[in-house]
Amino acid sequence: MRLIRTRVTSLEMKSRPETLVPIPEHAGSVAIFEVSKMPLAEYRALYRRVGAAHHWTSRLMSDERLRREIHDRDTKIFVMSVDGRRAGWFELDIRRQVDEVRIVHFGILPEYRGHGLAHAMLSRAIFAAFSAKPKRVTIETNTLDHPAALALYQNHGFRPYSIRDVETPAIETLREPLRALP
């Protein structure tokens, strides 16, 4: 297994913004909604469609472990659809730290990038996270993620509190082909 060196930036926000970022008018019919007990195949498809290019590996695990992680009562998964098709998702973890909600994953499918949807979805992720009344909301990004990720998070009010260098497994090939999403 080949390892890749990356710099991880941990960011935090201590108070909820005043307003939601509006959904872009030109975006089509956009809906962002919570999905309870998302089927593992659908979760993996979203995860891989977004994460493969950025060497995301934290959710490449057995069915049993993945089910425990994403179907836990303190894990909340929200999906964004555009004109009825999956366009992105975010995942909240409200159990890891007392008084903290972590945005574990945040991703827009490649074909929906560049249309202002990330701003609208991140705004809703922040509001959903603060609905649990934490003292802070956290998110991480690294130098393998989309180049606009760090600036996006900072533009929404997140501030870095930690930077560290790590090694992560490279994704050389996927065992299953990427499939279309509904």
Image: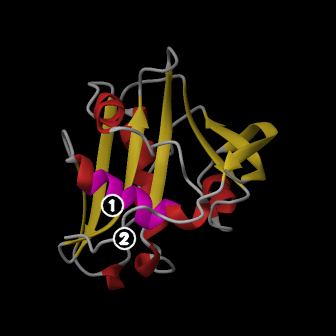
Is 45 magenta? The answer is: yes
Question: Which residue lies at the image location 47% right of the left edge and 23% below the top edge?
Answer: 134
Q: How many neighbours does mark 2 have within 10 angstroms: few (below 14), some (14-19), or many (20 or more)?
A: few
Q: How many neighbours does mark 1 have within 10 angstroms: few (below 14), some (14-19), or many (20 or more)?
A: some
Q: Which amino acid does the dot numbered 1 rest on?
A: Ala
User: Can residue 120 be spotted in the picture?
Assistant: no
Given residues 69 and 84, the one toward you in this image is 69
As drawn, 28 above or below 152: below
Is 16 magenta? The answer is: no
Given residues 54 and 127, the one toward you in this image is 54
Q: Position of residue 6 (x, y in %)?
A: 77, 51
Q: Tell me the tag on residue 45.
A: 1
Q: Tell me the tag on residue 15.
A: none
Residue extent of the magenta highlight:
42-51
Question: Which residue lies at the image location 52% right of the left edge and 42% below the top edge?
Answer: 58
Q: Position of residue 34 (x, y in %)?
A: 23, 46
Question: Which residue lies at the image location 50% right of the left edge and 34% below the top edge?
Answer: 102
Q: Determine which residue is flagged by label 2.
A: 178
User: Can residue 157 be spotted in the picture?
Assistant: yes
